[in-house]
Amino acid sequence: MTTILITGTGRGIGLELARQALAKGWTVYGSARSAVTDPDAHICHHPKFHDLVFDVTDHQAVRAAAAQVSEPIDILINNAGIIGPERQSTLDMDFDGFAKTLAVNTLAPLAVAQAFLPHLKRSSTPRILTISSQMGRMSYAKSDHIAYRASKAAVNKVMQGLATDLKPMGIAVALVHPGWVRTDMGGEGADIDAATSAGGILALAEGLTLDGTGQFANWDGSAAEW
């Protein structure tokens, strides 16, 4: 049976990913900065849900959490992310906020992947899927939320490089645009709900093989622009 690690399970897409993975009968390791307490998710006391409490930017805490897990990890989904500071234009930048955005959205996915790499190596079908965004594509010249856009463009490149390095080990790595989702980040006017996005993301994770490593897809499986 599949064992999955999902970061950012405290709310939104991450919480829904955990719920749907449990519904499939999978074992779920979920991480957030505090324990999952959402009663509507019905996962808090699920026997196959294991709550790992750590901040993805605290690399020592990430490594300590990995040391607590003894079983192989089949799928890692790097979901934790932030939209960035209120001031994030090229003409008026909160640089501390920019640095935090990069720490969460770009550096943390790599740190989590490195920490749990030994667990992935022990799986017969190891896969890493990182939530990115079409807002980071280089063909899109809009400059609003530039810290967020830059962090997603950067994580695309980092994960592309990781895919190259892990392919000889048999570990597939890909990126996914989750869509414009009705969450705290996406807002009420977004196109799709978290359940729809999460279902598509899990389907991508299930079907990911080395043939698709290094690729960037939309939540519905169609190819995404870099």
Image: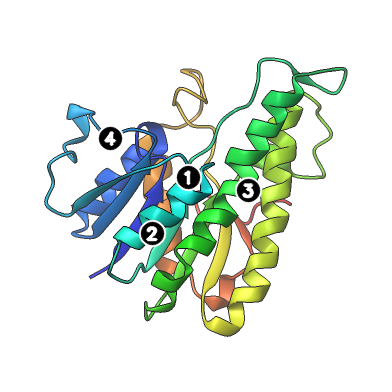
- Above or below for 70 versus 157: below
**Gap in angstroms between the C-alphas marked 2 and 1:** 17 Å
Residue 36 pos. (x, y %): 26, 34
Marks 2 and 4: CB-CB under 8 Å?
A: no
- Which numbered tag is attached to residue 62? none
Q: Tag 4 or tag 3, which sits nearer the N-term?
A: 4
| Rendered image: mark on residue 66 | 2
200 horizontally vs 23: left or right:
right
Residue 176 seen in render: no
Give how far apart the Cα atoms at labels 1 and 4 are: 16 Å
Q: Residues within 10 Å of mark 3 (few under 14, many from 20)?
A: some
Q: Residue at x 59, y 70 (%)?
A: 213
Residue 24 point in image, percent of width and height: 22, 57
- State which tag comes first along the sequence, 1 or 4: 4
Earlier residue among tags 3 and 1? 1
Image coords of residue 107 (percent x, y)? 63, 48
Query: Are discs 2 and 3 less than 8 Å apart at CB?
Result: no
Gap between marks 2 and 4, in whole Å? 16 Å
Amino acid under disc 3: Leu
Q: Amino acid at mark 2?
A: Ala
Q: Is 82 left, or right, of 135 in this rendering?
A: left
SS class of the residue under badge 3? helix
Q: Quadrant of the N terminus?
A: bottom left
Q: CA distance from mark 2 to mark 3?
A: 17 Å
**Which image quadrant is residue 143 in?**
top right
Element at label 4? loop
Lower sequence index among marks 2 and 1: 2
Q: What amino acid is labelled 1 in the image?
A: Asn
Q: Which residue is mark 1?
A: 79
To which residue does mark 3 refer?
A: 107
